[in-house]
Amino acid sequence: MARIAKPTDPTDREIFEIHRRYIAVMEGERLASLSDETKAHYLQVLRTLTEKLATPGKPLSEIVGEMLSEAAPLLFQAMRR
């Protein structure tokens, strides 16, 4: 997958950089520390979010609303551990 040049807009650049940091953190020790069950839930949430983000023209506010309702049970379950 080709990488695009870093954005010049300050906010876009900050988003770009935090995405890179997020990947580094998750691919580091964090992912290895998760249980198989947690990994399965996490993968489900990431897969769903990515599919929704890839839908052309779908407003981000709609995506966030859908993700909150879909991920809420998983978040509450994780908090009980």
Image (tube, helix red, strand yellow):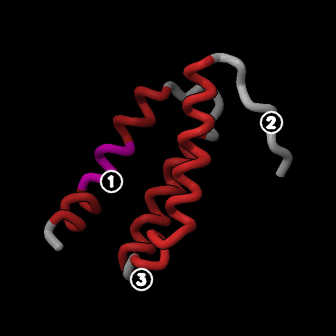
> Within 10 angstroms of label 1, few (less than 14), some, or many (20 or more) residues?
some
Q: Which mark is residue 6?
A: none
Residue 68: in magenta span: yes
* Quarter of the figure with residue 61: top left
State the CA–CA distance, disc 1 to disc 2. Answer: 30 Å
Q: Locate residue 11 relative to residue 70 in the image: left or right.
A: right
Q: Residue at x 65, y 17 (%)?
A: 9
Q: Residue at x 21, y 67 (%)?
A: 77
Foreground mark, 3 or 2, reads 2
Mark earlier in primary sequence (1, 2): 2
Magenta-tinted stretch: 67-72
Placement of 34 over or under 11, stated as above or below: below
Report the front residue among 73 and 34. Answer: 34
- Asked if the residue at tag 1 contacts the one at tag 3, i.e. Cβ–Cβ closer than 8 Å, the answer is no
The residue singled out by tag 1 in the image is 71
The residue singled out by tag 2 in the image is 4
Name the spot of residue 24 as percent of width and height, x first.
Answer: 58, 58
* Quarter of the figure with residue 42: bottom left
Residue 16: in magenta span: no
Placement of 13 over or under 30, stated as above or below: above
The residue singled out by tag 3 in the image is 36
State the CA–CA distance, disc 3 to disc 1. Answer: 17 Å
Q: Hey, which residue is sitting farthest top in the picture?
A: 9
Mark earlier in primary sequence (3, 1): 3
Q: Hey, which residue is sitting farthest left in the picture?
A: 80
